[in-house]
Amino acid sequence: MPEDFNLARPSSVPAHIQQISSELKLMGRIGFWLQLVLGVISAVLLSFGTLILLSSTSRTQGIEIGIIAAISGVGFLVVAIYFSRRYIQFSEEILNPNATERPKKSDTIQLIKTGLIFNLVGMFLTIIGAEALVGIILQKSLLIPQATITADPNKFINSADVLIVQANTNSISAHFAGLVCSLWLLNRINQKS
């Protein structure tokens, strides 16, 4: 019967380091998958919405800023996903029985802080995009006279506008998931010392 490598911990690795390793792995996996799924959904929705708007003759005025901010937020999300994956790899490096080759606590904290920064900047950009998009949609809805149909299609809210807002909302959720996982890890690592 093959030995389960997850249960076989070197006896020379202290218990608190084994605990930190398992928490890094768990939060890395949770953050990775949540951000990946929400990020893919955001990227797909954003791509479709942008393509629809670019090919449409009735383009919403000023929506470009919201789209650029949304795309930037997704770009930062890609880097944040990398950092969640890096937490998983780091969890294995921490289990090195040779204490001199094991990453230091400060290295672990710095890795988590860097991941936090990417999530914060990405969330900030995505929120700016969402604010711009929602403001444009609100303006369009307020300018449409009640019970009147106008001939100008630029005054109507179209499905691509809402699609891009949904993509932005998913990106915000993904960045939030990454922030929660990273902050939880920082808290746990600081408690272990």
Image (cartoon, rainbow, N blue to C red):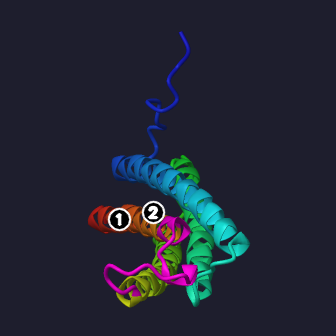
Q: Position of residue 85 (x, y in %)?
A: 57, 54
Q: Where does the magenta region start and end? A: 144-163
The residue nearer to you, when weighing 76 against 166, is 166
- Per the rendering, the mark at residue 180 is 1
Q: Is residue 67 left or right of residue 108?
A: right
The residue nearer to you, when weighing 125 against 187, is 125
Residue at 43%, 50% (x, y): give it. 30
Marks 2 and 1 in Cβ contact (< 8 Å): no
Q: Amino acid at mark 2?
A: Asn
Residue at 59%, 79% (x, y): give it. 67
| Total numbered badges shown on the rendered structure | 2
Kindly report the distance in space between the C-alpha atoms of the residues bearing marks 2 and 1: 15 Å
Q: Secondary structure at mark 1?
A: helix
Q: Position of residue 93 (x, y in %)?
A: 57, 52
The residue nearer to you, when weighing 57 against 37, is 57
Q: Is residue 90 left or right of residue 179?
A: right
Q: Secondary structure at mark 2?
A: helix
Residue bearing mark 2? 170
Instruction: Tell me the quarter of the picture where residue 135 sits.
Output: bottom left
